[in-house]
């Protein structure tokens, strides 16, 4: 049963005249007759009484005629939905975010997507830092909002949302807390609390890299799986750490964030795999580019 057959049936049911219905449909009368006969045969129903002088609906034809407009409307809506999905205007996009932070940029992106592309369902899934990157590269996510160093440009691309300053995180009672800024070498003799390798390999590695660039090896005395846990350990005086300034809101003023000079800023970026085939993703990327002020790059 095709849409042409249903539309032809509806026109004939209204006209009850093969010649007039064929004219309305811009087809020949024999073609219309064959189409209706094929429809009746497929349905196993007699839809019309035919004679040399008149055409009328059978009881089955009258019942079918009442339902056909709804069937056609649903079919057309389905085709429209499929077309939107094929073009990317309708669909689902899944973006990975860090599990233990409140990301205001993610909220703004979600709000703008809902306003501009209401047929595209944007979902966030939370991960540890290490799993966030792994899941993107494994094709489990359409994109991620990532912090730290940029991913390999061979497989991924990214849009810089902002750049965050690296800070030394110290107990409020520490003499270091009174400093306006610090250098990494100022932390040479301190005990360190760091993110664990399993939860944030990039974060763990960054501490060691910054210390190596400053000419020392950090004395790591504790590891944390979550940023709030790391901050709590620092507040308890276990050691110092390093985090970006955008996470200061989590400290509840129980630790001090002191800007680190002489170290690179941390990129807060929206990253995706270049071979991603989700037709809805380009609309999200175009919106994120506009929000980041990068135009059509």
Image: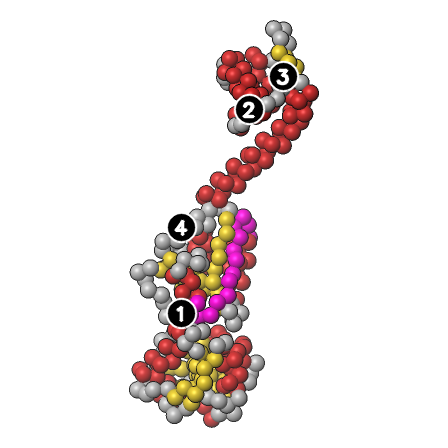
The residue wearing badge 1 is 267
Tag 3 or tag 1, which sits nearer the N-term? 3
Q: Nearer the viewer, mark 4 or mark 2?
A: 2
* Secondary structure beneath label 2: helix
Tag 3 or tag 2, which sits nearer the N-term? 2
Q: Pointer 2 and pointer 3: residues touching (CB < 8 Å)?
A: no
Q: Residue at x 46, y 88 (%)?
A: 239
Q: Is residue 118 magenta?
A: yes
Disc 1 versus disc 3: distance between alpha carbons?
71 Å
Residue 140 screen position, x and y as percent: 44, 58
Question: What residue occupies the far top of the structure in this picture?
Answer: 52
Q: Nearer the viewer, mark 1 or mark 2?
A: 2
Disc 2 versus disc 3: distance between alpha carbons?
14 Å
257 w.r.t. 269: above or below: below
Q: How many other residues sit within 10 Å of disc 2, few (<14), some (14-19) or many (≥20)?
A: few
Q: Residue at x 41, y 91 (%)?
A: 190
The answer to whether any part of residue 87 appears in the image is yes
Residue 193 screen position, x and y as percent: 45, 84
Q: Is residue 183 left or right of residue 78?
A: left
Which quadrant holds the C terminus?
A: bottom left
Question: What residue occupies the far front of the structure in this picture?
Answer: 44
The residue wearing badge 3 is 48
Looking at the picture, tell me which residue is in the foreground, 189 or 64: 64
The residue wearing badge 4 is 277
Q: Is residue 62 magenta?
A: no
Residue 42 disc label:
2
């Amino acid at each position: 049963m095709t849409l042409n057959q249903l539309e032809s049936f509806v026109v004939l049911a209204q006209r009850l005249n093969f010649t007039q219905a064929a004219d309305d449909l811009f087809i020949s009368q024999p073609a219309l007759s064959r189409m209706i006969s094929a429809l009746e045969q497929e349905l196993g129903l007699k839809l019309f009484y035919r004679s040399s002088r008149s055409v009328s609906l059978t009881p089955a034809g009258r019942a079918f005629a009442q339902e056909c407009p709804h069937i056609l409307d649903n079919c057309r809506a389905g085709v429209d939905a499929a077309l939107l999905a094929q073009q990317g205007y309708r669909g689902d996009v899944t973006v990975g975010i860090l599990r233990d932070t409140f990301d205001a940029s993610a909220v703004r992106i979600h709000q703008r997507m809902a306003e501009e592309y209401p047929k595209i369902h944007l979902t966030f899934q939370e991960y540890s830092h290490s799993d966030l990157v792994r899941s993107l590269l494994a094709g489990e996510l359409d994109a991620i909002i990532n912090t730290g160093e940029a991913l390999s440009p061979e497989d991924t691309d990214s849009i810089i949302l902002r750049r965050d300053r690296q800070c030394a995180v110290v107990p409020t009672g520490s003499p270091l807390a009174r400093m306006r800024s610090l250098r990494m070498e100022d932390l040479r003799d301190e005990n360190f609390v760091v993110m664990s390798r399993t939860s944030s390999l990039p974060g763990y590695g960054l501490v060691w890299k910054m210390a190596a660039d400053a000419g020392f090896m950090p004395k790591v005395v504790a590891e944390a799986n979550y940023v709030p846990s790391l901050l709590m350990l620092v507040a308890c005086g276990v050691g110092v750490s390093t985090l970006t300034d955008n996470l200061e809101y989590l400290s509840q003023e129980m630790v001090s964030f002191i800007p680190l000079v002489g170290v690179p800023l941390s990129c807060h970026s929206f990253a995706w795999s270049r071979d991603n085939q989700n037709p809805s993703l380009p609309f999200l990327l175009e919106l994120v580019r506009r929000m980041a002020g990068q135009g059509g790059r």
